[in-house]
Amino acid sequence: MKPSDLQALPAPLTPADCDLQDFKFMPLDVARLRDSDMASEQTPEENWSAVLLWAAAWHQVPAGSIPDSDNWIAKAAGYLSRGRIDPHWKEVRTGAMRGFVLCSDGRWYHPVVCEKANESWVSKLKQRLKTECARIKKHNDRHKTSIAFPEFDAWFAAGCPVGQPLPVPKDITPLSPRTESPVPGDNTPLSLDEVLGVPGETPSKGQGEGQRQGELTSKAMSGGANDSSREDDDDRFPRRPQHQGVSPDMRAVAIATLLTGAGVRKVTAFHPAVAVTWAQDKRVTDELLLAAVARAKESLGDEPFQVPYLSPIVVELLNPPAPKPAKVDNHAWRRSDQGIEAKGRELGMMARAGESWNQFAARIDAEIAKRQGQAA
């Protein structure tokens, strides 16, 4: 496939460095699988091969994806022996690949596996941040500093930096006109910008450990966030950015932040609805998303909800039903004697002597039907 053709495909459903090879277990929604159309419509051979491909995708990098290679796919599904593809593979391939989507990086992604992978990836990153905060705490205890622990959202959007050199009081110098120079022994909490922007001490034992195991390669995860010349976090990570000049990946981060603040549970920038659908549709504004959240809360009250509940509401707001045309009552004239008389005059008819209004109306109906038949 040509690069130009790939660019027209959806963005990958998990980040490029999403590595879950140390996750031995893949979450399986038993009821969802048991009650799925796949379970009822496909053969056991197709379904078994599909599950094997899910398992293979779980330990690929990015997690949730498989390469676009028929030999590789056939082997992962159990249909390659001694370098040859089993002739029966062509009978089960379509069923085994059910749900997989080819994305712009040339790999196949399964949305449900990616949904579980993104949740696991975020939990892994949170553990990584927990380790980083423990390192900062140890540094604070050792040097009597008060370096602030980074919040997950800001740390995540900055590219999940770990192992950065941390300043000690003797290294702290004025940073910008807006901050006064801290003095040795001053325990004023430092911002994340100050932590990353000040030359630090030579890393002590353990300080360089945990150096990034995998940079988040998506531009959305960096967005220039490591530029310490930026003034503050609000400028770097606006809660409500406009579409102009914002990449889909950065838009996905902004949407995830917005919805999390609005009370939607378990939102990540890698959820397919966020990253693939909403972030790339300029019609999906912050106002529309907040309107969808408000409508969901009207229905659910205080009950928590996640993105899948919000998706159909967004679709409905984007595609409001066309107003129904006003019903034309072609028999309204029958409701009164005056109406019957007026309809008769319209057709050049008059009531006969001794004819009741109902009989006259029936004769008008017959005349209308006759004229319609002639017109046809």
Image (tube, rainbow, N blue to C red):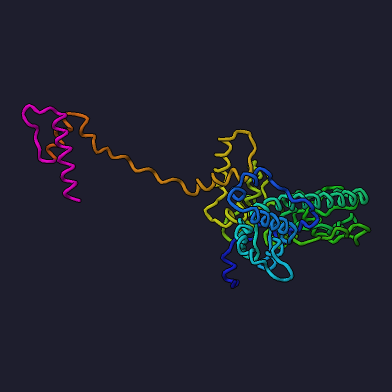
The residue closer to the viewer here, 113 or 227, is 113
The residue closer to the viewer here, 335 or 185, is 335
**Residue lying furthest left:** 353
* Image location of residue 319, percent across then percent down: 47, 49
**Left or right of 255, for residue 373:** left
In magenta, the rendered stretch is 347-376
Q: Is residue 156 above or below residue 304?
A: below
The residue closer to the viewer here, 105 or 200, is 105
Query: How many numbered marks does the figure carry?
Result: 0
* Image location of residue 84, percent across then percent down: 70, 70
* Image location of residue 234, percent across then percent down: 68, 51
Of the 4 image quadrants, the one containing the N terminus is bottom right
Evaluate whether residue 246 shows in this view.
no
Q: Residue at x 10, y 28 (%)?
A: 355
Residue 354 drawn in magenta: yes
* Image location of residue 158, percent across then percent down: 73, 57
Evaluate whether residue 92 shows in this view.
yes
Using the rendered view, name the quadrant where residue 334 is placed: top left
